Image (cartoon, grey):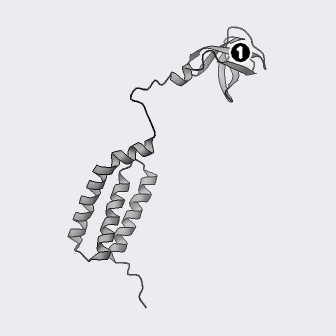
Amino acid sequence: MGGVNMMDPALIWFVVGLVFLMAELIAPGLVIVFFGVGAWIVAAVCLVKPISLNLQLIIFIVTSAVVLACLRNRFKTLFSGHTTAVQNPNKDIEDFVGKRAVVKETIVPHKSGKVELNGTLWNADASEEIAIGESVHIVSIDNLLLKVKKS
């Protein structure tokens, strides 16, 4: 009966690679995964031909570094999404100015209430009292506080 040899270098390198891949899930940064790939390459080489530990370590270091250098930027763009070179962090919020919202909690001068805009509740302030259910339009934004007027 041929059992699994737990000291088989191919199995050890495979498990090491698996640990690196799981570590990438815990500490994402798209670096650790390439060491997992390097470990799996060593595991594949060990399956084909037994090699010394020194050669295994050299193959691991070299292949991990080469795969990291060649593929990290390519994969990073796939996983990070699209960003523009110049971003305006207020752009989306500034788009609210001029939009209509519905009062969900009475607004009293100098005491914010709540308005619903695009299905989301926002804190809102006005210079006059505005009752629940009334329609308002947004005139400005101060941080995340909407300044509104009756429509």
Q: Viewed as shown, does residue 95 lie left or right of 126? A: left
Q: Picture coordinates of residue 58 (x, y %)? A: 22, 64
Residue at screen point 38% across, 29% down = 85
Quadrant of res 66? bottom left
Quarter of the image for the N terminus: give it.
bottom left
Circle 1 Cα neighbour tier, 10 Å, few/some/many (<14 / 14–19 / ≥20) = many
Q: Is residue 143 visible?
A: no
Taking 16 as reference, is 68 above or below it?
Answer: above
Q: Viewed as shown, does residue 67 lie left or right of 78? A: left
**Which structural element holds mark 1?**
strand
Residue kind at label 1, given as amino acid type: Val
Q: Picture coordinates of residue 73 (x, y %)? A: 34, 45
Q: Picture coordinates of residue 13 (x, y %)? A: 34, 69
Quadrant of res 107? top right
Residue carrying label 1:
136
Taking 79 as reference, is 55 above or below it?
Answer: below
Q: Residue furthest top?
A: 127
Residue at screen point 46% across, 23% down = 88
Residue at screen point 34% across, 73% down = 10
Residue at screen point 33% across, 58% down = 35
Quarter of the image for the C terminus: give it.
top right
Taking 10 as reference, is 4 above or below it?
Answer: below
Taking 11 as reference, is 144 above or below it?
Answer: above
Q: Viewed as shown, does residue 52 lie left or right of 149? A: left
Quadrant of res 118? top right
Q: Residue furthest bottom?
A: 1
Q: Is residue 64 visible?
A: yes
Q: Picture coordinates of residue 146 (x, y %)? A: 62, 18
